[in-house]
Each structure stands twice: as structure tokens, then as C-alpha cells.
Amino acid sequence: MNQPDERLEQPQLDDRLRQLAIAAQHHPPGSSARQRVLTELVSVLQHSGKLSRPRRGQFQMLYEEIYVEALQHLFSFICERIDSYNPQKGEVLQWVNFLLNQRFFIIASREFLPTVYEGMDARTVKRLTLESLDESNPYELNPQLIPHLSQEVKECLEEDPEGLFEQACVANHPTASFRYLALRRLEGYSWQDLSAELNIAIPTLSSFYQRCLTRFAPKLKTYLS
């Protein structure tokens, strides 16, 4: 795989991305050849400096987390649905940025702020960390807040005294428990790593993980108190 050392000019970038997308489409789905080309395609996009930044200025401290999650959704979609790209309708970058702006940033923001209702200013909502669960009950602060895992609760997750974290699993994937995912994330594994290991799509893993964080926040607070 060629690792881009510097950003390409727009015409060269469009040509390179188009070549990679078409090459990927010519390889059978699931083949190692297709995967290699898709890996390079994603790498070129990441290094291009041309990926859009939707709704900059919103979500305050949450923006970067939402953006990273949106990119993970986007790259997963590209790898799974590269055949939906039509070179006759536009350049790869146009297709990718449209998806990022109109679909995946919105999906990611809803995962981070799933209960931001109409009329509620999302910019005023801050994401809670589990460190703060040592100090206060998140539901007393704001019932819409989603806690973030931290090293502070690793021992609690490992012990899992009631077996709750191990019992909560992705549907039809008993090995993909909340306990397993949370501990692996604490160890530094990315969603891409876990997706490849468990053979489960990144959006499925990420959505399950976020729902479990919300569900288990009171229980974790109890264990830590």
C-alpha cells in the first residue's frame, strides 16, 4: 500500500481516488485484493485534508469526538458499500463529503446526544466522564448525559460482580459483550480493530456501546460509591 507523504493537488487527488474506487469495485466483495485497495482509498482520504467539517462551532467540547465517530461510520460504509459509488455522477470526494455532511455526522451526533429534543440547545449539553461519577449522580445533573469510560472503572468492569456487563451483548454475538468491548477500548483498541476481530460492523458496535453506557451509568455509580 502506498502511504501518501504529502497532500495531492485537487486534480491528482480526484484521479487517484477515482482509480482506487473503481479498482475496488472490480475485485470480488470480501476478497483480500478489494480490502487492500479500500485500505489505501481510506488512507488517501484521511491524508487529503479535503474531508469536510460539518457544523463547526457546534457541540463545543464534543465536536471532535462526534467527528471521529462520524468518520468511522463513513469509512465503514465506504468499505462495505463501495459499489454504490458511481463515477458518472461525480468525484469520490464529492460522494464522500455528501455522506459525511448529510448522513454520518448526523448519525454520530445523535449517538452522542440521543435525547437532545427539539428546542434544546445541544451546545449547552456536556458529556459526562466516569471520573465525575465518583462525585455526583449523573441523573441529578442531567438525565441526557452519557458517561465516558475511563481507567477509573476498569477494575469494576473486570470484576462485574452481578455479571451485568458480560450479559449485555450485541444481538446474536455473545462474545461481543459490553464488558469485553469496554475493556478493549480502555486498552486502546479502535472500533476498526474490534470490528475486524468480531466481524461486526462499526456502527453496530458503536451504537450498542453508547446505549450500554447510558443504561449502566447508575449501576457504575453505585459500584464506585
Image (cartoon, rainbow, N blue to C red):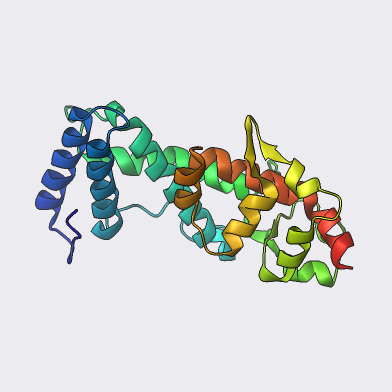
Left or right: where does residue 95 sit relative to residue 181? left
Identified at 26% across, 59% down, the residue is: 47
Question: x, y percentage for residue 84?
Answer: 30, 27
Q: Residue 220: x, y in percent?
A: 82, 59
Is residue 27 toward the left or the right of residue 180 in the image? left
In front of the other: 31 or 99: 31
Q: Is residue 68 left or right of residue 219?
A: left
Which sits in the foreground, 64 or 219?
A: 219
Residue at (57% x, 64% y) in the render = 187
Report whether residue 143 is seen: yes
In the rendered picture of this protein, how many numbered marks are placed on residues?
0
| Position in image of residue 103 (x %, y %) | 46, 38
Please say if 34 is above or below 130: above
Tell me which residue sits at (69%, 44%) in the image: 211
Could you say where residue 95 lies in the image, as x and y percent from the top left?
Answer: 29, 37
Q: Quadrant of residue 150?
A: bottom right
Quarter of the figure with residue 225: bottom right
Q: Nearer the viewer, residue 162 or 207?
A: 162
Residue 114 shows in this picture: no
As drawn, is 12 to the left or to the right of 72? left
- In the rendered image, the vertical position of residue 41 relative to residue 139, given as above or below: above
